[in-house]
Amino acid sequence: MSAATPVVHRPFPRTTAWVVAGLAAATALAVWRVQPDVASLLTLKTLTAFGDTFGRLWPPRTDAETLDNLRTGLAETASMSVVGTFLGALIGLLLMPFCAETISVRGALVDEEGRPRSRQALALSVHNAARLLANVLRTVPYFVWAMLFWFMVGPGAFAGALAIAVHTGGVIARNYAQALDQVDPRPALALRSSGARRFHVFLFGILPAARSALAALTLYRWEVNIRESTVLGLVGTVGLGFHMKYAIGIFDWKAASTHLVAIIALVLAVDALSSFVRKRLA
Amino acid sequence: MQGGDRTTFRWVAGALAVAAVGAAFVGAEFDVGRLTGAKAAHGGGMFLKECWPPRHDAEFLSLLAGATLDTLSVAFLGTLLAVAIGIPLAAMSSRNVIYGARFAGADTPPAGTARAVFVASRTFTAAFRSVPEVVWALLFVKAAPLGALPAILAIGVAYGGLIGKVFSEQMEDVAPSPVAALEAVGAGRVRTFAWGVLPQAFGPMASYAAYRFECAVRASVLMGFVGAKGLGFELQVSYGDFLFGEVFTETAFLIVLVILIEWASDAMRRRIA
C-alpha cells in the first residue's frame, strides 16, 4: 500500500444508511397502521392511571382463599413446565438421530465403500421426514397446540403440559441435532474403523461428546417453558397466569399482586436453578 | 475427597430431579388414558374435521392480512421501543462505560454517583425482564386501554430489560484499547461510548435485536389474547365461537409469518456476521 492512500476509518458498516432508511420506512408503516395514541398516553390523567394501577398492587393479599389459589396455581404452572420439558426432551431424543445430518446422511455411521444408492436415498428421505415433523411441531405455536389438547382432554394442566411437550419436542429436536452435528467426528471414525457396530459408535463415539450440550439445551428450554406455562394460564384456565387474569378481571388488584409476585419468584427461581446446574455441568 | 463429593452431589441431585419430575407428573394430572381414550379421539377428530374446509373467502383473507400487519406493526414498534430503552440501560450497566476503560473487568467498583447509577440501572433492567411481556400487557391494558399502545409498551419494557442485559454484556466484551485511547485524548463519557464502545459492539447488538424482533412477533400474537388487535385476537374469537375452519386458516397465517420472520432474521444475521 502506498503511503498516499488515505485510510478511512468507518466506525459503522457502510450499509448503515440503507438500514436506517429501511427501519424508518418500516416505522412509518407501522405507525400509520396502528396509530398509537401517544398524545393520550402522555396526559396527566393516563399517567396518574398508571400510577394508581401499580399503587393498588400493594400490599399483596394473603387471605386463605388467595393463598389456596396460589398453591394450586404454583403447582399447576410448575408441573406443566416440568412435564412439558421432560416429554419434549423425550420427543427430541427420539427425533434427534434422524434430524442430525452427521448421523443419518453422512459421517462415520454412513460413509462406507459400496453402500447401495437405494439405502442412501432411503436415509435421506427419513432425514427429511424427521426434519419436517420437527418443523411442524415447532412452528405451530404452543397455544394452538393447547387449543387442540383442550378439546381432546379438557382444559387443565394436562392439556397444557401436552401442548408444551409437543412444541418443545420440535424446538429441541432441532437444537439437539445441531449439537450432534458439531461433535468432533474423529472418535466416531476411529471406533467405526476398529469394527464397532453403528449403534455402539453412536452411543460411545458421539453421544458422550454432546452430552453436556444436550443437558444445557434442555435446562435452557425449561427456562423458556416456565414462562410459556405462565402465559398458557393467561390464554386458558390453568395455573398462576389464570388466577392473575381472573383477579384483574374482577379488579381485585391485591390478589393479582400475590399471583404476580409468585410468577416473578417462580421465573427467577427456575432461572437460578437452571444456571446453577448448567455451570456445574460445564 | 473431591471425587467423592462430586459423586454424592450427583446422586443427591439425580434423586431430587427424579422426585421433582415424578411430582410434576402428579401435579399436571398426567393420564395417558385420557389422551388415548375414545373421548379424546372423538374430540380431536371433531376438531380436525371442523378444520376442513378452512375458511378462505376474500373478505376473511383480507381481514387476516390486516391483522397480520397489525401484529407485525406492534412487534416492530415494541422492539424499537425496547432498543430505545435497552441502549441507555445497557450503557449505564456496563463497567467500561460508566466507570471507564480501566475498570472493564474490575469486580469492586468505586463508590460514588457512577456506582449508584450502575446499581440502579442493573436493578431496573432485572425488574423489567422478570415479568413476562404478556403479564406487562395485562397490567397496561387495564391502566390505559389505548388500542395498540399497551401491547407496544409491554414488549418495550419486558424486552428493554432483556436487551439491556445482553447489550451490556456485549458492550463489556469490546476491546479496551480504543476506549482507553479516547479517554486519554480527553473524550467525555458520551463520546467515548458513541465512538469507542458502540461501533465495536454494533454487530452483535444488531444481531440480538433481530432475534428479539422474532420473539416480539410471537409475543405480539399472544397480546391478542389479552385485548390487543392482531392475529391472536382473531384466533381467540374464532376459537371461542368453535369456528375451527377459521382457526385453521389463522394458524396457517401464523406459521407462514413465523417462518418468514425467522428466515429474514437469519439472513440479516448472516450478513452482519
Image (cartoon, rainbow, N blue to C red):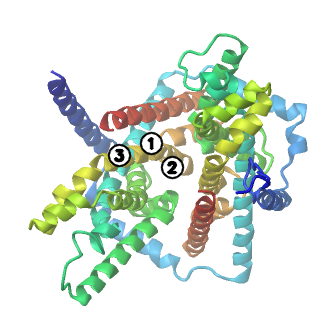
Above or below, A71 against B62 in this view is: above
- Circle 2 sits in a helix, a strand or a loop, which is it? helix
**Residue at left offset 78%, top offset 44%:** B145
Residue receiving disc 2: A232
Above or below, B33 against A259 in this view is: below
Picture quadrant of residue A58: top right
x then y, percent, for residue B32: 27, 58
The answer to whether one can see residue A252 in this image is no
Neighbours of disc 2 within 10 Å: few (<14), some (14-19), many (20+): many
Q: Amino acid at mark 2?
A: Leu
- Of circles 3 and 1, the one toward us is 1
x then y, percent, for residue A196: 10, 65
Would you say A174 lies left or right of B83 here?
left
Q: CA distance from mark 1 to mark 2?
A: 15 Å
Residue receiving disc 3: B28
Marks 1 and 2 share the same chain: yes
Picture quadrant of residue A106: bottom left
Of callouts 1 and 2, the N-terminal one:
1
Residue receiving disc 1: A223
Disc sitting over residue A49 in the figure: none
